[in-house]
Image (cartoon, grey):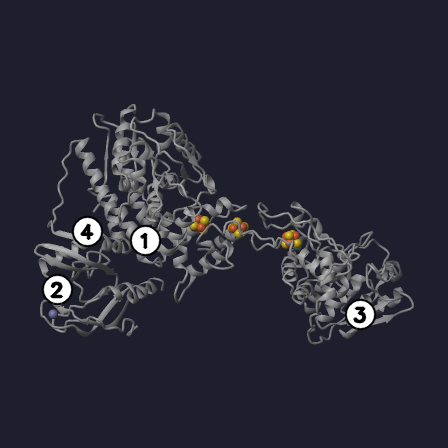
Amino acid sequence: MEELTLRKFESYCTQEDPPACQCRCPVHVEAGQMLAKLASGAVDEARKILERYLPLASLTAFLCDGACLEKCLRANLDQSVNIPLLEREIIVNGRATRLYPLPPTSKRVALIGAGLSALTAAYELARRGHKVEIFHLSTPGGTLNSLAEDKLPPQALVEAIDLLESLNTDFNQVQSFEPQWFEKLKKEFGAIFLSLDDPDLLPQSLGLNGELIVDPVSMALKDSNDYLFACELTQSYPMSNLISSGKKVAASIDRILQGANLTAARENEAVRESKLRVNLTGRKVIAPIVPSNSGVYTTQEAQAEADRCLNCSCLACVPPCPLLRSRKGFYPKKWTREFYNNIITAFGIRHSNININSCSLCGLCSSLCPNGFNMSEFIDLAKLDMVVTNHMPVSAHEFALEDQLFSNSKPAYFLRPQKGFKSSAALFFPGCQLTASLPKAVRDLYKYLAANFEGGLGLWSACCGAPGRWSGRRKFTDSTISLLRTDWEAAGKPEVVLACPSCRRFFLSEIPFIPIRSLWSLINSLPLPSSAQPFSGELSIHDPCAARLDTEGQEAVRAILSKLGQKIIEPTFTKTTTLCCGYGGLASLANPVIGQQFVLERLQSTTEPIVGWCAVCRDRFKEQQHPALHPLELLFPQLSPKEAMEQKPPTISDRRYNRAAFAKEMLKDIWEEEIEEEKTMNLKIEISDKVMDDMERRRILISDVTAVLEYTEVNGPMFLNPESGRQIACFRPRQVTFWVEYEKKDDLYIVTKAWSHRMILKSAPGPSLDSPATLEGYARSGGRV
Amino acid sequence: MGHAFAKFDAEGWNCKKCGRPLTPCSVNVEYMGSSFFVELPGCQECGFILIDDELALGRMLEVEKLLEDK
Ligand code: SF4
Ligand code: SF4
Ligand code: SF4
Ligand SMILES: [Zn+2]
């Protein structure tokens, strides 16, 4: 992956942009952090933060006119947080931070005039170790000397001047400013600053008679060879601008003295709009705290006022996503960087493989993000990269890839025109998960559709290829697409009716040349099937994450349910913000723990049974013992709704069996084709529910156990426990070695345990030890085994 | 990696063919292009090695994942 790609994605996540108040503040005080400290009673820490940004804070905190107030987001709820007044409270009650000026440099800087801008510039320059000489006519401070006591405590100015003197700054009182004197000064100093906010200083007295133009970034005077600087030139000289002028000038002069570029990378010094987006819904109104004691906060009042700060941040996408919230303090910008570093790791362990594979590609973040940040697009690129560079953990997705191959080979795969038709006006494509979960309902659905369809509705039983794509395997996916394309072209390039939202998304992006149509819109345009019956209670509707943007499907499903008289309720997160069941992106396969958190997130606030129009979602809810239905179970019921929603979900073995059985039965019943029985040894095998549960979690199929036992039947078992009479055998039919422990009663195998591993032992028996068949190899054969 | 699976617990199990109790055998194990020797219970005579569920689903799985993330 290119670093540029990372940058592009990072730029969509603006969580790191400072809050509005900080962007508006001319010296960018980190008010949010400061107020959080103050609110918690840590006033010294709050002062430390303030002093980091505000030069000569013990003086300037009394003077700042609070430009931030106009931007504080609290104003949208009630009234801005009184940051300027709180800064005063912090200075009065917080302990001053110890200063550690840099060691003295040999550089000398002259400041002419001693207005506020000169004092702040002197502070910043002296801290950097430069020798500062201030030349002034009357008492330093300029107009500050005439401020009322309640505005500026008089000792604040005196103490500020003492502090500057202690910091290597000389105050030189002169009788007058003269052009010749100025010329002499120019020869003596590395840089000169004009504090034009000091009423004593008139440019003409220095012989500067033309119009003075100041560069807003560097504060350098035009045509002065970056040697003369001045404060911002305005009529009224707002205090906050003077403070920031001094700070900017000091930074400029420091650059000049160090021989650095004067203007490079200074964008963030300017006042600007914040790109941080803050969601204010649900935030409480809190009336501003009015100081009880003549305009000054008590400690309690200050804490309460500081506590009004919303501590502005975005994080809109983080809480509902189990992946994004899985690391404290992380949000998409940090995650993408983490993922990027993971995939460019040259040596060592790639610790974040598991996290990359834990994104369900559900797109929720992109619906919630004000900038449309979409993690699934980034993860897609990351996975492709991992596969190409041979760094995708093989075990992460293998089961689903094998499942895909199974669905696209005999006996599960077929395409037939409608019985009695030579060609098809359209093909119904139920998708591999629907035939795995609800084969009987799909059979009835097909009969109903075909009876109502003009021009012949063929049936196409296959897997679209989404699992391979989710695993980042481009070549594997391409071979699936070419299989589908060949058969679709041979069928006369008809329109394809899709039932599964993931198929739909996959067809749209990967097979765009095949015209598609929504099953749900089609059903909605037909009379309801006579078998249809609603559930008596309310159902919580669940939109699959792949249908997040499929408004047509969302509306059609709701319309069908409403025609049926089914009462539904909408969950909090629904339609474009629907929550993922965790199967998407094969997340639950690669990381079952996070996969479960996805389902639980959806189930958390739902007490009603769920009706969801993706078979996998339905089954994953059921796995958590939450009653769930697919709309087809109401339209083409095989059981009462109550029984159906409470029935156990199919196991991984059932799913394969159902796909093959669906094909076999349909071809026999409708097309009157006889399917050759698979030759097996017909061993008698008994597996308890407990062992089946273990096998389900370990992704061991009944056919894997059978393979071990068939091998054993021929070659004999490997180990025997004379005491218990149990036996153990193993076999490696593919990339996995399967082990079975069993008891044998006559010709009955009673399986007591089944487990597996992937490592290859030199002594493990089995045919594919030396050249294990690879998935890519299967794929090259066109996906047909 | 030599001691990755340093564990010996095949109490009660014999080789079916030879009838011998299982004893520690040095076995070459291979995964993701890495190969190393570990000691595992097996039959000295015919070389059958027993990997029980605890080992396969515990330490061995961890090492597999580690090698996959390398
Ligand atoms: S609420 Fe707090 S962080 Fe947000 S803009 Fe106002 S002061 Fe700044
Ligand atoms: S799982 Fe969904 S919400 Fe979470 S990062 Fe991935 S696409 Fe975004
Ligand atoms: S919603 Fe998420 S991705 Fe978007 S800016 Fe906020 S934290 Fe970043
Ligand atoms: Zn033996």
Instruction: Identify which amino acid the numbered label 1 is placed on.
Output: His
Give the quadrant of the N terminus of chain B: bottom left
Q: CA distance from mark 3 to mark 4?
A: 86 Å
What is the chain letter for disc 3?
A
Determine whether label 3 and label 2 are within 8 Å by CB: no
Residue placed under numbered mark 2 in the picture: A725
Q: Earlier in the sequence, mark 1 or mark 4?
A: 1
Q: Position of residue A637 (x, y in %)?
A: 28, 33
- Badge 3 and badge 4 both on one subunit: yes
Q: Position of residue A486 (x, y in %)?
A: 27, 38
Location of residue A223 by image quarter: bottom right
Residue A397's disc is 1
Q: Earlier in the sequence, mark 3 or mark 1?
A: 3
For label 4, count other residues whose C-alpha is less than 10 Å away and answer few (under 14), some (14-19) or many (20+).
Answer: few
Element type where label 1 sits in the image: loop
Mark 1 C-beta to ligand 2 under 8 Å: no
Q: Residue furthest left?
A: A746
Determine whether label 3 and label 1 are within 8 Å by CB: no
Q: CA distance from mark 1 to mark 2?
A: 37 Å
Element type where label 4 sits in the image: helix
